[in-house]
Image (tube, grey):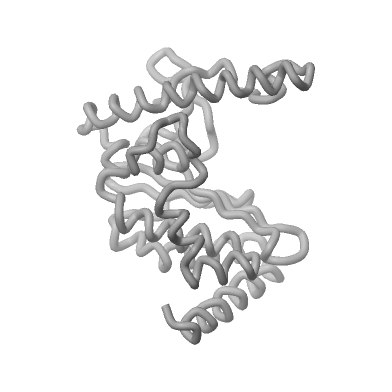
Amino acid sequence: MKADQVSEIITEVWEFWSGIRSLPSNTRLERVAEHIEKTLQLHQRGFQRVFQESKGVIGYESGLSRVKFVYYMGHHEPTEDELREYYGRSHAPFTELVIEYQGTRCFCWHHPYILYAFLEGLRPTENLHDTLIEREFKHSSLGQALLEKGLGSEFRLRLLWLIWQKHAQRLFCIFDPNEQELWNTYRAYYHVELEQRKKRDELVAVRANRSVYEIDPWANVKEIC
């Protein structure tokens, strides 16, 4: 991407994230939702907005799955803002992380880094915060400019667009109830990562002389749904 194009985008998105800060919370969240929908072409991908609440949660669903975005506005500047995405199956309530499902307590919203590592064929024990797509975008002219400006929310959106361009079909099929074999493959992958995370949390707890439940309040939840 040419330097003048990058500069134009940076100016535009800085004005957007700065400009919404003075708006009432409901209006601000509406603007964020519209920006997400435009950037990710959500409607063209078959997603409809079905949930929105003032704490910053925006929820979408399609015929295959659900996606929710959680937006945290920092106190002073857009550089403090955060935007996170999570994925779920059609039974996942937008306001809950853990539910009782078919007699088992389970996580119903799925962390993107584990999903993206699965899609890129990384081992569960590899660094989940440094997938190939993210490394490439960090070193692109636009990615570098967004990070230098501190526009983490916009960086997240632009990175997500790239991930969806490459993996959207298989990503959303993971949560399709008709794709049970793919779900079982992902579930097995997740459990390997869960065991590794459990070992890390136990080690941290021992070193800090704390309970593992202080490190991870959901340490007793062993399943996903």
Spot occupied by residue 40 in the image (x, y as percentages of width and height): 39, 62
Residue shown at 33% from the left, 61% from the top: 43
Residue shown at 61% from the left, 70% from the top: 17
Q: Residue furthest top?
A: 103
Between 57 and 156, the one nearer to me in the picture: 156
Q: Is residue 91 left or right of residue 107?
A: left
Spot occupied by residue 130 in the image (x, y as percentages of width and height): 49, 46
Q: Residue furthest bottom?
A: 4
Between 48 and 208, the one nearer to me in the picture: 208
Tell me where residue 88 sits by quadrant. Answer: top left
Looking at the image, is 176 positioned above or below residue 76?
Answer: above
Looking at the image, is 30 positioned above or below residue 200?
Answer: below
Looking at the image, is 19 positioned above or below residue 203?
Answer: below
Q: Quadrant of the N terminus?
A: bottom left
Spot occupied by residue 85 in the image (x, y as percentages of width and height): 49, 48
Residue shown at 30% from the left, 54% from the top: 166
Spot occupied by residue 204 in the image (x, y as percentages of width and height): 69, 23
Tell me where residue 213 sits by quadrant. Answer: top right
Residue shown at 33% from the left, 30% from the top: 186
Between 224 and 64, the one nearer to me in the picture: 224
